[in-house]
């Protein structure tokens, strides 16, 4: 508990996992026979490479590795985990949930585990749910995970989407703040969706409709326009809700879909790219995993320091979008 009156969740540890195999734009084009070029992909998206899971490597395998790293960084043991919440669009199976598989592999035998579906905004949604559970006393320690194997749901004949995504996992361990941590913690989360725009970024099949998995489809230009306006209003909302301004933000950790969208958000917040965590060049778009992967990288290399105010934002299929503010 932070101040004796309000319970606050602290991001006590972060962890990331990337599959071993990194594939450059040129390698991808050659391997899949795509009519594209490294220069088009770099200029339009900032992506230079992505990682792809090995045969048989699943969202739960990658999520488990990210969770272990997050617990290790937090100095926490499995016995402190009350809940596992996984955001994924690429679960190992409809059930058991990917979260249940991770819980089982961690050897956690109490509490609860479940998946949520909010596409690229999934991590922000999962963080919001975890925060609410801490504040209402349903849990004291929650693993919040984003893990994705988009390489299994891409249409390799659609150069407009298949070059954009990669595989990976990220996790944070969110626990109740201790008495000496009054200044730290998750300040607020802000969730939005507008189902009228569901078709502009979608997976065109699923267990309950086609019986299969389907592939990613996207009206890129339309999504781009929504991204710039909706993310701008979400970050304004998060700062205003806490009486903070852009000067207070130490780091922007955005969803990593396109460097042009990331730069637009940086400009909006008057933050140079030296205060924005960018991984899209090396990871591509790992959907729900992109923010926790970026957090893991920037806390390990010392960019994000204790006390830093970190602003996170994401948009994805649904449409879903949102933002979160946390003091590390
Ligand atoms: O994570 C969820 C959120 N997702 C996003 O935020 C993604 C938002 N959208 C985008 O990032 C961009 O719209 C894209 C990167 C997907 C596309 O960039 P764009 O500048 O909007 O390009 P475009 O779709 O308008 O296409 C421009 C041209 C087209 O050719 P024509 O019609 O002008 O002759 C495309 O066919 O580029 C062509 N094109 C490609 N050319 C080479 C599309 N994909 C490729 C490709 N290589 N991979």
Image: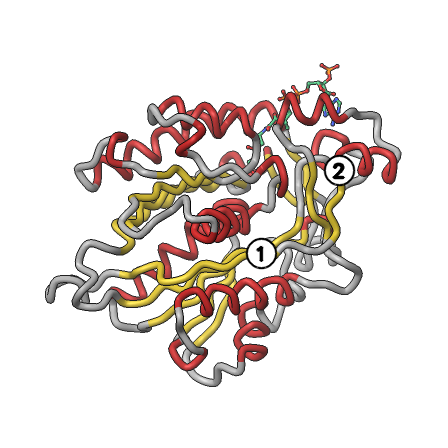
Residue visible at 61% across and 35% down?
281
Where is mark 2, residue-wise?
Answer: 24
Q: Quadrant of residue 16?
A: bottom right
Direction from residue 154 to residue 3 in the image, left or right:
left
Callout 2–callout 1 Cβ contact below 8 Å: no
Q: Decide which of 22, 130 is in the foreground and name it.
A: 22
Mark positioned earlier in the residue sequence (2 or 1):
2
Residue visible at 36% across and 27% down?
271
* Residue occupying the far left of the picture: 4
Ligand 1 neighbours mark 2 (CB distance < 8 Å): no
Give the crowd class for mark 2: few <14, some 14-19, many >=20 residues within 10 Å: some
* Residue occupying the far front of the picture: 302
Ligand 1's image quarter is: top right
Ligand 1 neighbours mark 1 (CB distance < 8 Å): no
Q: Can residue 87 be seen? A: no
Q: Quadrant of residue 221?
A: top right
Q: Position of residue 165 (x, y in %)?
A: 66, 41
Q: Secondary structure at mark 2?
A: strand
Q: Position of residue 213 (x, y in %)?
A: 72, 54
Where is mark 1, residue-wise?
Answer: 169
For the image, the number of numbered tags is 2
Residue visible at 29% across and 31% down?
236
Q: Secondary structure at mark 1?
A: strand
Task: Identify whether 43 is placed above or below 49.
Answer: above
Q: Position of residue 305 (x, y in %)?
A: 34, 49
Direction from residue 311 to residue 115 in the image, left or right:
right
Direction from residue 280 to residue 296 in the image, left or right:
left
Give the crowd class for mark 1: few <14, some 14-19, many >=20 residues within 10 Å: many
Rounded to the nearest angstrom, the CA distance separating label 2 from label 1 is 19 Å
């Amino acid at each position: 508990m932070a101040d004796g009156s309000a319970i606050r969740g602290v991001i006590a540890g972060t962890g990331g996992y990337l599959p071993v195999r990194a594939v450059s734009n040129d390698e991808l084009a050659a391997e899949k026979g795509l009519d594209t070029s490294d220069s088009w992909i770099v200029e339009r998206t900032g992506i230079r490479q992505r990682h792809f899971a090995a045969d048989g490597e699943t969202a739960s395998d990658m999520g488990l590795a990210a969770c272990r790293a997050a617990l290790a960084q937090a100095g926490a043991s499995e016995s402190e985990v009350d809940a596992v919440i996984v955001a994924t669009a690429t679960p190992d199976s409809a059930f058991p949930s990917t979260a249940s598989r991770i819980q089982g592999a961690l050897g956690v035998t109490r509490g609860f585990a479940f998946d949520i579906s909010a596409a690229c905004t999934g991590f922000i949604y999962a963080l919001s749910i975890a925060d609410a559970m801490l504040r209402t006393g349903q849990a004291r320690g929650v693993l919040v995970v984003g893990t994705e194997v988009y390489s299994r749901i891409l249409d390799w004949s659609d150069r407009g989407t298949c070059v954009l995504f990669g595989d990976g996992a990220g996790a944070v361990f969110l626990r109740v703040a201790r008495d000496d941590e009054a200044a730290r913690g998750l300040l607020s989360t802000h969730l939005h969706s507008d189902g009228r725009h569901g078709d502009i970024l979608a997976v065109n099949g699923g267990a309950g409709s086609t019986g299969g998995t389907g592939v990613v489809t996207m009206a890129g230009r339309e999504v781009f326009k929504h991204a710039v306006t909706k993310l701008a209003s979400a970050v304004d909302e998060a700062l205003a809700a806490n009486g903070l301004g852009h000067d207070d933000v130490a780091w922007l950790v955005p969803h990593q879909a396109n460097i042009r969208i990331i730069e637009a958000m940086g400009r909006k917040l008057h933050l140079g790219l030296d205060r924005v965590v960018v991984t899209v060049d090396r990871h591509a778009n790992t959907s729900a995993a992109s923010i926790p992967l970026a957090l893991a990288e920037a806390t390990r290399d010392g960019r994000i320091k204790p006390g830093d105010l970190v602003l996170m934002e994401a948009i994805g299929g649904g449409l879903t979008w949102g933002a979160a503010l946390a003091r590390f």
